[in-house]
Image: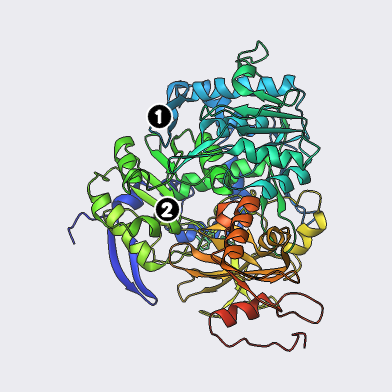
Amino acid sequence: MPEDTPITISQSSDGTMYVPGSEIVENANVTAYMKQKGFQSYHDLYEWSVRNPQEFWADQANELEWYQRWEKVLDESNAPFYKWFVGAKTNIIHNALDRHVKTWRRNKLALIWEGEDATRRTFSYQGINREVSKIASVLKSMGVKRGDIVTIYLPRIPELMFCMLACAKIGAAHSVVYGGFSVEALADRIEDAQSKLLITADGGFMRGKVVELKNIADEAMARTPSIQTCIVVRRTGHEVNMESGRDLWMHDLLALPIASEKCETVPVDSEETLFILYTSGTTGRPKGVVHTHGGYMVGTYATLKYVFDIKEEDRWWCAADPGWITGHSYIVYSPLIAGATSFMYEGAPNYPYPDRWWSMVARYGISILYTAPTAIRGLMRFGEAWPNRHDLSSLRLLGTVGEPINPEAWRWYYRVIGGERCPIMDTWWQTETGHFMITPTPVVPLKPGTATRPFLGVETDVVHEDGASCGANEDGLLVIKRPWPGMLRTILNDPERYKNSYFERVPGVYTVGDSARKDEDGYTWIIGRLDDVIKVSGYRLGTAEVESALVSHHDVAEAAAIGLPHELKGNAIHSFVILRAGVEGTPQLEEELKAHVAHEMGPIARPEKITFVSTLPKTRSGKIMRRVLKAQALGQDVGDISTLES
Ligand code: WT7
């Protein structure tokens, strides 16, 4: 290896260790913080941070501006309903935009956007502030106010970001539904949030085709009487149905005098709801995870700054969709809070050619790239020649999220994309956690396939069902031992579900729902979900939602869905269906049912395979034993089936 390589490779008890070089370590934001606190090592800094988590988080909060400071960092009096920065007045928009437009950063590039059709739009901080203010004043004059939940269903275009920020600015909450979801998924979420306003578009581009979002929205609105108004953003120029008295074009509204470029940011309580984001759980309908202004603002900012080492001159690309938590936290909010320049791309990674991403990295000089294992595996299969055509030397750090990364994909990412120079931040977190929880920082030695250790101020463990810690390399439940600022505050309309989903399985701690083990070096290896959640291409889907989409078809009497390993997607959905009497299970019907699930839920939920069966394994209380179906499909021992119905 050349002498100046910033990463050296050594052997650890558990395979190869990639040790960041002195250049990376010396220049890291986290090193500056370590020195400021008077510590000699990252380990010492971590130990201090978990002994004094409130002081650590208050340090981070002090770097931001508040209308009124907090009286208390953490209020645990009504656990597990924790409150952070109690008594403070703030608004995340003040730190994301208002603060910057008062300084030289008003002219700094905040967002570079490229459409799949190669259109480019760029916005400075001042530019975003203007767009957001106009949308916010329109929403305000339409009567949107604190306590309202605006549902947003848009493609990956700048307006998605602006609409979210506009809601926050006036103290309303947003509920973004991923543009890849479809009718039933959208309708369920609108219904639960009781939204009166939906913001959508005339479509979006994906793989050269138009995704007809407005048609899907129309079908969903037909099922959800709460919607009174639908604002439509023009993206494709395709003709869409506009229902008079309900549907309005965004560009018409923005041309009205009510669309003022001056709109005051509303000061809110630190604990005011910022957004609802739905995610799949063990049973039933998706859960509306509630996040708030103050703690979320501090947690996302601190993690971006220390983990991805964001500096003034960086060009940051989080290649997720803003419609998922990754996009909320690390495309929309924290990069703006940090004053960074972000890049956002609308379309498919391999469109029109498999080097689309690499050409954009080179053209825009991206310095930090954050994506998911499924995308890496997908691009890896086209071979090295595609990335090798491009100058990727601007890259300094890489990241991954969503599911465990297989070491083969990790090494390819490290070698071919990162040129053996860029440490890979494997960040473990969830919709519920709001920000990174287990993750390296650029000073931590890496092993392919593990998110390494908990972030500063965060304490996790792997435990047995009774709460006792597991030994090294022993499988157990991953838990988080104390509250953190960006944590969910509750489940919308269902505080009981909040308590029993996360705080009852192991008393006194937050149970994640993942199985994991810790190795001799204290590194956490995620094994997988313990519940009926399937990770398809890193997206989280509930078996219950897929099953409900299947039984909504007139030929289906009962259905079960499981995840089975898939080379590119990580997991793929396999369904078992009992048909209504007299219906025959033909290959045509299998295709029809797959299309039906895609229509109701979205293309990501489309089952890989549907098997027609006459019975499903059930417990005596009538619950489908998906574990048994899975073991059978994998040709494994079905294990303890003593509760199986006979
Ligand atoms: C679940 C949460 C938070 C961003 C996207 C996913 C799995 C997430 C990793 C990782 C191994 C991971 C876990 C977790 N997961 N990141 N780096 N290594 N597994 O958010 O949709 O709420 O899913 O994703 O199983 O519980 P989400």
**Front-most of residues 538 and 586:** 586
Q: Name the residue tied to disc 2.
A: 399
- Residue 576 in the image, given as x and y percentages of width and height: 64, 72
Q: What mark, if any, has residue 635 been given in the picture?
A: none
Q: At x 71% / y 63%, what residue is drawn? A: 555
| Residue 66 seen anywhere in this rendered image of the structure | yes
Q: Quadrant of residue 329?
A: top right
**Front-most of residues 609 and 337:** 609
* For residue 83, above or below residue 374: above
Q: Amino acid at mark 1?
A: Thr
Q: At x 66% / y 78%, what residue is drawn? A: 468
Callout 1 secondary element: loop
* For residue 381, above or below residue 170: below
Q: At x 35% / y 52%, what residue is drawn? A: 25
Q: Quadrant of ligand 1?
A: bottom right
Q: Amino acid at mark 2?
A: Gly
Q: Name the residue tied to disc 1.
A: 119
- Which quadrant is the N terminus positioned in? bottom left
Q: CA distance from mark 2 to mark 1?
A: 27 Å
